[in-house]
Structure formats: structure tokens, C-alpha cells
Image: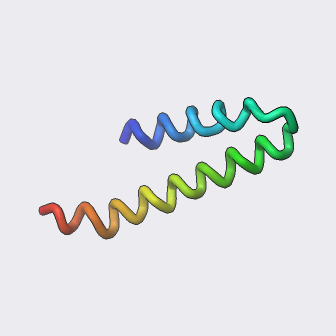
Amino acid sequence: MLSVCFSLIGLPLWAANDSHPRRGLKKALIWVVIFNLFYVFLLRVVVPRLG
């Protein structure tokens, strides 16, 4: 579960390097949503098949 915490802190920090604030905010939101969708996919599809 630490990966979720790292993504919620790390992805916005990475996107904050953008020179335009609005573009950086959009980038941060898009990457957080993409990460969350990927994480849900892993939890719903991959983890049940492991055990």
C-alpha cells in the first residue's frame, strides 16, 4: 500500500517541475488517475489469479 502513498506524493512533485501551473496540474491529475486505474486493474485481475 505504500505505492499508493508514493504515487500521491511523487507524481504531483514530478509534475510540479512544469513551467506552466495549469499544465502541471493537468499532468499531475492525469498521471494520478492513470496510476489508480492501473492499481485497480492489478487488484481486480492479477491478484486473484496469484492465489
Count every numbered label the image shows and give the total: 0
Q: Position of residue 8 (x, y in %)?
A: 56, 39
User: Residue, x 85% and y 44% (percent of image)?
Assistant: 22
Q: Looking at the image, is 33 positioned above or below residue 7?
A: below
User: Residue, x 41% and y 40% (percent of image)?
Assistant: 3
- Quadrant of residue 4 within the rendered picture: top left
> Which of 1 and 28 lies nearest the eye of the viewer?
28
- Quadrant of residue 12 within the rendered picture: top right
Q: Position of residue 25 (x, y in %)?
A: 77, 44
User: Residue, x 78% and y 35% (percent of image)?
Assistant: 18
Task: Report the quarter where the C terminus lies.
Answer: bottom left
Q: Is residue 14 left or right of residue 25?
A: left
Q: Is residue 33 left or right of residue 6?
A: right
Describe the colour scheme in one phrase.
rainbow
> Which of 31 and 40 lies nearest the eye of the viewer?
31
Task: Report the quarter where the N terminus lies.
Answer: top left
Q: Looking at the image, is 18 positioned above or below residue 44?
A: above
Q: Position of residue 27 (x, y in %)?
A: 71, 48
Q: Position of residue 46 (x, y in %)?
A: 27, 64
Q: Is residue 5 left or right of residue 31?
A: left
Q: Looking at the image, is 18 positioned above or below residue 25?
A: above
